[in-house]
Every structure is written in structure tokens, then in C-alpha cells.
Image (spheres, rainbow, N blue to C red):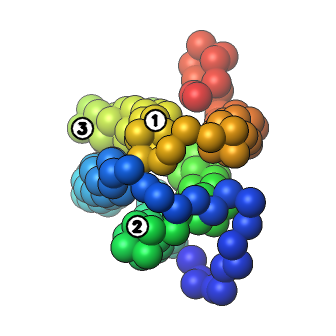
Amino acid sequence: MKKGVYHKDKYTFSGMLSDEALWTFEFFSKSLADTLSDYLDVMEENHLCIPADDADELFDMLEDISADLRDDYHADCLQLGRFRENILAFYDLAFSLCSDLEDDLSDAPLEAVYYSQVFVQGLKHFLPVMLQSLLMDLPESQKLQQFIEQIQRDFSGLAPLDIHGSRLN
């Protein structure tokens, strides 16, 4: 993901009460990256298709979002508009990658199915827990509530359906 100049928007916050969301992001980012890496290794060992460019881009996106969050927390100026754009782009690519990898799961060993399911579960829980952590970090405000509602609406449009026809959000 290319770094650019980002201007403050209506979802810029200061006066953080804690750094819970930063560490929540770091935890999920590391967990998702490790699981995806293991998943791709198993797929490769079994000579199954790996969309390596998309996977590499996902790793880069997580690193970039993490760096932005660390900078924001250090500056006590959390730019959630930028976070929203970046996390939704991450999810869009992650869901696309999952869809591409899912096509090969019918011939995949159980270990690949395991990592696939762990990765999807991580994706499923990442954003809701992250948003909850942001609520703990920032003083309560109408503007924050509007941000949470907006990102949830945006995310629900991206989330694929699970095997039961329910959205993954």
C-alpha cells in the first residue's frame, strides 16, 4: 500500500485515555499474518494455487496500518478516517483472497482447511474487537459513535456470506 499525505478529517480524535486499540490491532495483525503465512506454506507444500501478490499486499497493508496507528498514538491524534479507509481496503482484499483460496480447499489437506478456518475466524473478530477497543481509548462522543456506525455500515457491504447465508460481520 502506498503511503500518501493524509489530511485530518471529521474523524480525527485526540485526548486518548489509553492505547488499548493499538495493542488490539498489533495482536490481531500478528495473529492474522502468522496464520496466513502458515496457510500459504501448507498450500505451497501441497502444490495448490497461491495468490502470492495478494498475500504480500495484505502483509504490507497490516504493517502500514500498524505504523500509522503507532504514529497517531504517539502524536495523540488518532486519524480514524484514514484508519477506516485502510482497514476496509484490507478487508476487501482479505475477503477476495479467501475466496480465491477457498476454490482449492476441496483438494486440500485438513491442515490447510484448519488454517483457512482460523484465518477467517480472525477476520471475523478483528474489526468488532478493534472498534470496542477504540471506544475504550477515546472519550465518549457523538462523533465517535457516528464513526463506529459508518464503519459498520461500510464493512457490512464488504463482508461475504458464510455457508449458512449470514454475513460474516
| Residue 160, image x, y percentages | 65, 34
Q: How far apart, in angstroms, are the residues tagged by discs 2 and 3? A: 38 Å
The secondary element bearing badge 3 is classed as helix
Which amino acid does the dot numbered 3 rest on?
A: Glu
Dots 2 and 1: beta carbons under 8 Å? no
Residue 83 shown left or right of residue 67 in the figure:
right
Amino acid of disc 2: Tyr
Q: Where is residue 13 in the image (x, y as percent from the top left)?
A: 58, 59
Q: Residue at x 64, y 85 (%)?
A: 4
Task: Determine whether, in the image, residue 111 is placed left or right of residue 80.
Answer: left
The quadrant the C terminus occupies is: top right
The residue wearing badge 2 is 73
Residue at horizontal 58 percent and vertical 50 percent from the top = 91
Of residues 75 and 110, the one nearer the viewer is: 75
The numbered dot on residue 132 is 1
CA separation in Å, label 1 and label 3: 32 Å
Q: Mark 3 points at which residue?
A: 111
Q: Which of 48 and 70 is in front in this view?
A: 70
